[in-house]
Image (spheres, rainbow, N blue to C red):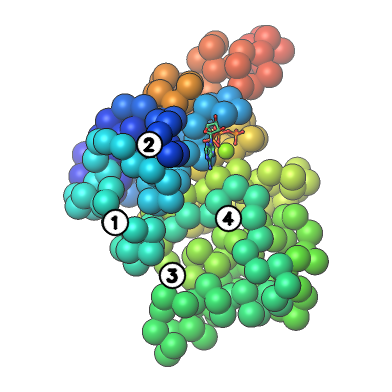
Amino acid sequence: MSAPTLALESVTAGYGDNPIVRDFSASLHGGTITTLIGGNGAGKSTLLRAIYGANRFFSGRILFNGQAIERLPPWERLKRGIGFVPQGRCNFPAMSVAENLKMGCYTLPAAMHDAAIGRVVALFPMLKQKERTEAGNLSGGEQQVLEMAMVLLVEPTLLLLDEPSLGLSPKMQGDVFTTVQQIAARGVTVLIVEQNVRGALLISDRALVMEQGRKFMEGPAAEVRTDPRIRQAYLGGNIQQTAA
Ligand SMILES: Nc1ncnc2c1ncn2[C@@H]1O[C@H](COP(=O)(O)OP(=O)(O)OP(=O)(O)O)[C@@H](O)[C@H]1O
Ligand SMILES: [Mg+2]
């Protein structure tokens, strides 16, 4: 197999004096989708933040395309191609959709802004229809799409998504998953945390399971999906167990 896009080697990270994620190792390969599963407070968001450089890194190594990045600030990681869409946040609610997209271009040369915005608007036509709407007045799902679009402006090769379908209707959740698949099909490596574990596993190549900050299980998504412990804990238990 080719060298991984992202290699986590015994990563320990957290906040202040508290390590939350401990000794976590994993490899993500180009163009694959990996779901990170774990209960509330397990440390999933903390791991995504650690990959982006947005919290305290204690020890271990993070290799991105073979290069150690664990001491780089977030903007340097973004420049190298790591895009992070944090859990439930609208960056600039009082600004219009068009203004938000313009903000999202800030790391790009001015001459590239229009093309970058054109690209993401083609992917999410809703953004064009609502370009004059204040971002804070978009529906939850539309705000999520805007957040994803803003990160995609800079064409990341690794996309970290924290609960992209949270609070969305089933239809919008499906749209988000389809979009993630389209992004990965273009070669982008995706690490996704999802409250809709079942939906995320269905579009994923692999799954990582975290319990209390430590890796508990990993494997092909189809295998993790049928593991009795995973069904019990994250997929609604016995009902599902008899279904397939
Ligand atoms: N900014 C912070 N400062 C201090 N502790 C934090 C901070 N953010 C999270 N924590 C703690 O880290 C632990 C893991 O939180 P984290 O947000 O990573 O969990 P999670 O797996 O993403 O949970 P959820 O499914 O609820 O989003 C929790 O005990 C939480 O209280
Ligand atoms: Mg979280």
User: Mark 2 near mark 3, Cβ–Cβ under 8 Å?
Assistant: no
Residue 15 in the image: above or below residue 151: above
SS type, badge 4: helix
Ligand 1, what quadrant?
top right
| Drawn side of residue 74 relative to residue 194, left or right | left
Front: mark 1 or 4? 1
Give me the residue at 74% from left, 45% from top: 167
> In 3D space, how far apart are the residues under numbered discs 2 and 4 (Cα atoms)?
30 Å
Labelled disc at residue 72: 1
Q: Residue furthest bottom?
A: 111
> In 3D space, how far apart are the residues under numbered discs 1 and 4 (Cα atoms)?
29 Å
> In 3D space, how far apart are the residues under numbered discs 4 and 3 (Cα atoms)?
17 Å
Disc 1: CA contacts within 10 A as few (<14), some (14-19) or many (>=20): few
Asked whether 91 or 114 is in front, the reply is: 91
> In 3D space, how far apart are the residues under numbered discs 3 and 1 (Cα atoms)?
18 Å
SS type, badge 3: loop
Query: If you read the primary sequence from the N terminus, does the residue marked by circle 2 or circle 4 appear first?
Result: 2
Q: Which residue is mark 2?
A: 13
Query: If you read the primary sequence from the N terminus, does the residue marked by circle 2 or circle 3 appear first?
Result: 2
Query: If you read the primary sequence from the N terminus, does the residue marked by circle 1 or circle 4 appear first?
Result: 1
Residue 188 in the image: above or below residue 125: above
Labelled disc at residue 154: 3
Where is residue 62 shown, x and y percent of the image? Answer: 27, 44
Kind of residue indicated by mark 3 = Val
